[in-house]
Amino acid sequence: MKKEITVQTKTVEEAVKNGAAQLGTDENGVVYEVIEEPKRGFLGMGSTPATVKVMYVFKPLEAARSFAQTLIKDLCLDAEVVIHDDGSGEALMEITGADAGTLIGHHGDTLDAFQYLVNLAANKKETDERKYTRISVDIENYREKREQTLRALADRMAQKVKKNGRSVTLEPMNAYERRIIHAQVQGIAGVSTNSVGAEGNRRVVIYLEGTEKPTEENAAKFDPQQSRGGERKDRRNNRRSGRGGKKSSERTSAPRDEEKPVYKRPADKPRPQPRKIEKAKDLDAYFAKLKEFSSNNPQ
C-alpha cells in the first residue's frame, strides 16, 4: 500500500522535500521519480520547473491501520484502532468503541473477513524486500470468549459421546476454531476427533476411540442432517411399499365388474332437435310458455 503525489518546483530536491511534507513524513521515508528535469531557459524565458512523483510506501502495520481506519470511517462506526506489536512479525489489532461489535458478525464471520482484508492490505508487496507480517484482529475480547465457549463445547460433547457411545458432529467451523476443538479433545481419554466435509462447510466429528474413523468417504454416515433425512426417506418408502402391496393384492383378488353395455343410437333414427323456448317478458309468461311447450312435445 502506498501514497503518491506529483510536485512541480524549481529543483528536484525542493520537490522531494515538499512532497514528503505533504505525505506526512520526511525525505528519508519516501522514494521519488523525476518525470521532467528543470530547465532554466534564457533570461528567465522558456524555463520549466522540475516535475517529480514522490511516493511513500506504508509499512505493514501502518498499511493495516490506515485500511482499518478508512473502513470504519466509511461505515460511519464509532470505533478506534489500536495495534500492539512485539517486533516478532506478529501483531494484534484491537477495535474498541461503541459500534465495534458490529464488526463481529455471527460466530465471528464478519470479524474473520475483516482480519483477512487487514492482512491483505498489510502484506501487499510494493518491493521485494517487504516481509510478511501476521496481524490478528480482536474486538471487545471476542477471540478469548469464543475460545472458552468452544473448549466448553468440546468437553460437553466428548462426555456425551462417551456416555451414549455414538459420534457427534459439530456445526461448520473455520480452521482456527476447529484447531481449538481438536486440541481440547486430545486431552480427554477415550475419544478422538477428525474433520470431514468440503472447505466452507467443514465439521469436526467427535467419536469413540476404537470405532470407525470419520473420513471423506463415509462422511455422510456422520452427518446428522443427511442421516436423519435418509432414515425418514427409508421409512416413507417402506410405508408406501407396504400400503401399495396390500392394495395391489386386494385388487388382484377382487373380481372385476362386468362391463356395462353402451347405448348406441340406430342409424335410421334421426337425431332429436334441441328444445327451444321463446323469450318471455316476465316469469309468469315464461312458465306458461314452458307448459305449452311440454303439452305440444310429449315425451
Image: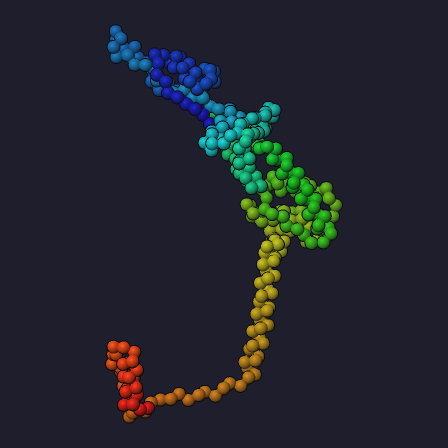
Q: Is residue 154 above or below residue 58?
A: below
> Residue at point 40% right, 15% down?
18
Q: Is residue 155 above or below residue 50?
A: below
> Which of the pair 152/198 is nearer the observer?
152
Residue 102 percent location from the top left of the image: 53, 36
Q: On the rendered image, what quadrant is the C terminus found in?
A: bottom left
Question: Which residue reaches farthest front?
Answer: 284
Q: Is residue 35 above or below residue 71?
A: above
Question: Which residue reaches farthest right?
Answer: 189
**Count the marks: how many?**
0
> Which of the pair 10/290 is nearer the observer?
290
> Which of the pair 41/178 is nearer the observer?
178
Residue 60 percent location from the top left of the image: 52, 26
Residue 37 percent location from the top left of the image: 34, 15
> Residue at point 61% right, 57% down?
227
35 vs 77, left or right, is left
The image quadrant that residue 152 belongs to is top right
> Residue at point 30% right, 14% down?
48
How are the residues colored?
rainbow
54 vs 290, left or right, is right
Residue 88 percent location from the top left of the image: 60, 26
> Which of the pair 187/164 is nearer the observer?
164
> Residue at point 57% right, 67% down?
237
Q: Is residue 121 visible?
A: no
Question: Which residue reaches farthest top?
Answer: 43
2 vs 132, left or right, is left
Q: Is residue 180 above or below residue 5?
A: below
Q: Is residue 78 visible?
A: yes
